[in-house]
Image (cartoon, helix red, strand yellow):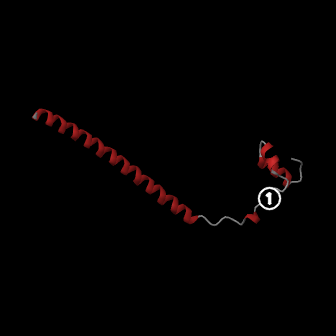
């Protein structure tokens, strides 16, 4: 009886040790994610607001059908802005 208890206690210790290792790995992963979050926050603080949409060139010649059929919608839009046929 005592031998069986000792065996089970040893197995429990092994499972507990494995669980500790897994928790340490998770903790490192969370710490890494927190570091990345802080780094991104620092970068975002330096970003200026984007220009208003009205300052961006428009592509009035593009419609949904043209956009779906175009292999390169940006090139088609640029051509239309420059007065060339798409």
Q: Residue at x 44, y 57 (%)?
A: 34
User: Could you tell me how many numbered marks the image carries?
Assistant: 1
Q: Which residue is mark 1?
A: 58
Give residue 86's position: percent from left, percent from top: 86, 47
Q: Residue at the spot x=19%, y=36% of the render?
A: 8
> Relative to 77, is 6 on the left or the right?
left
Graded by Cα atoms within 10 Å as few (under 14), some (14 to 19) or many (20 or more), the crowding at tag 1 reads: few
Image quadrant assignment for residue 12: top left
Instruction: Give above or below for 56 relative to 76.
Output: below
- Residue at 41 percent of width and 49 percent of height: 29
Q: Residue furthest front?
A: 1
Q: Is residue 27 above or below residue 55?
A: above
Q: Is residue 29 left or right of residue 59?
A: left
- Percent from the top left, x then y, of residue 85? 89, 48
Placement of the N terminus among the 4 image quadrants: top left
Residue for point 84% across, 50% down = 79
* Residue 84 placement, left or right of 55: right
Where residue 43 sits in the image (x, y, percent)? 54, 61
Out of 60 and 38, give the one closest to the viewer. Answer: 60
Farthest left residue?
2
36 or 30, which lies in front?
30
Helix, strand or loop status at disc 1: loop
- Residue 71 image point, x, y percent: 78, 42
Q: Which image quadrant for residue 81?
A: bottom right
């Amino acid at each position: 009886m005592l031998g069986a208890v000792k065996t089970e206690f040893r197995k429990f210790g092994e499972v507990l040790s494995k669980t500790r290792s897994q928790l340490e790995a998770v903790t490192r992963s969370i710490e890494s994610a927190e570091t990345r979050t802080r780094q991104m926050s620092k970068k975002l603080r330096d970003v200026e607001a984007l220009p208003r949409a009205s300052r961006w060139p428009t592509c009035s010649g593009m419609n949904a059908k043209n956009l779906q059929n175009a292999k390169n919608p940006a090139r088609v839009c640029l051509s239309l802005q420059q007065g060339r046929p798409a």
